[in-house]
């Protein structure tokens, strides 16, 4: 699954005054913006892993059904 997110530029939507803050505040916002993208990517990967794990579980159940029920019954019918 792909997620899309629009983040406005710091200059477009500043919630603090440039006059009353220092450059460290700018650094914090820049770091926060880069972390948001990384967290979004992490959420995508996590969801993909969950979906794959669900499919693996379904496949494992089908294989077990074949191995322990259908194949032995077919073998019994043939012999």
Image (spheres, rainbow, N blue to C red):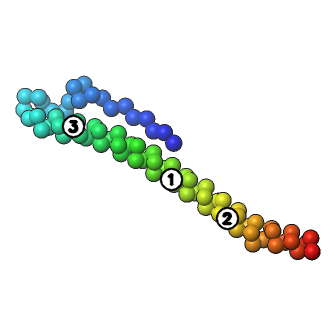
Confirm whether residue 39 shows in the render. Answer: yes
Q: Residue 29, labelled with which disc?
A: 3
- Residues marked 3 and 1 touching at CB (< 8 Å): no
Please identify the residue farthest to the top as the structure is shown: 12
Secondary-structure class at tag 2: helix
Residue at 23% over, 36% down: 30
Distance from the alpha carbon under mark 3 to that under mark 1: 30 Å
Confirm whether residue 13 shows in the render. Answer: no
Give the mark, 3 or 2, whose residue is nearer the N terminus: 3
Give the mark, 2 or 1, whose residue is nearer the N terminus: 1
Between residue 26 and residue 67, name the one nearer to us.
Answer: 67
* Position of 31 relative to 71 (above/below): above
* Position of 7 relative to 57 (above/below): above
Q: Residue 61, labelled with which disc?
A: 2
Determine whether, in the image, residue 30 is placed left or right of residue 38.
left
The residue pinned by badge 1 equals 49
Residue 3 sits in quarter: top left
Determine whether, in the image, residue 57 is placed left or right of residue 71.
left
* Quadrant where the image shows the C terminus: bottom right
Residue at 18% over, 40% down: 28
Distance from the alpha carbon under mark 3 to that under mark 2: 48 Å
Position in image of residue 39 (x %, y %): 36, 45
Label 1 neighbourhood size at 10 Å, few (<14), some (14-19), many (20+)? few
Between residue 73 and residue 6, name the one nearer to us.
Answer: 73
- Residues marked 3 and 2 touching at CB (< 8 Å): no
Distance from the alpha carbon under mark 2 to that under mark 1: 18 Å
Position in image of residue 68 (x %, y %): 75, 72
Give the mark, 3 or 1, whose residue is nearer the N terminus: 3
């Amino acid at each position: 699954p792909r997620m899309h997110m629009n983040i406005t530029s710091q200059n477009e939507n500043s919630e603090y005054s440039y006059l009353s803050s220092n450059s460290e505040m700018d650094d914090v916002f820049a770091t926060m913006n880069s972390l948001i993208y990384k967290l979004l990517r992490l959420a995508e990967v996590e969801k993909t892993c969950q979906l794959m794990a669900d499919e693996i579980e379904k496949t494992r159940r089908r294989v077990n059904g074949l191995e322990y029920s259908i194949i032995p019954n077919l073998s019994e019918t043939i012999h």
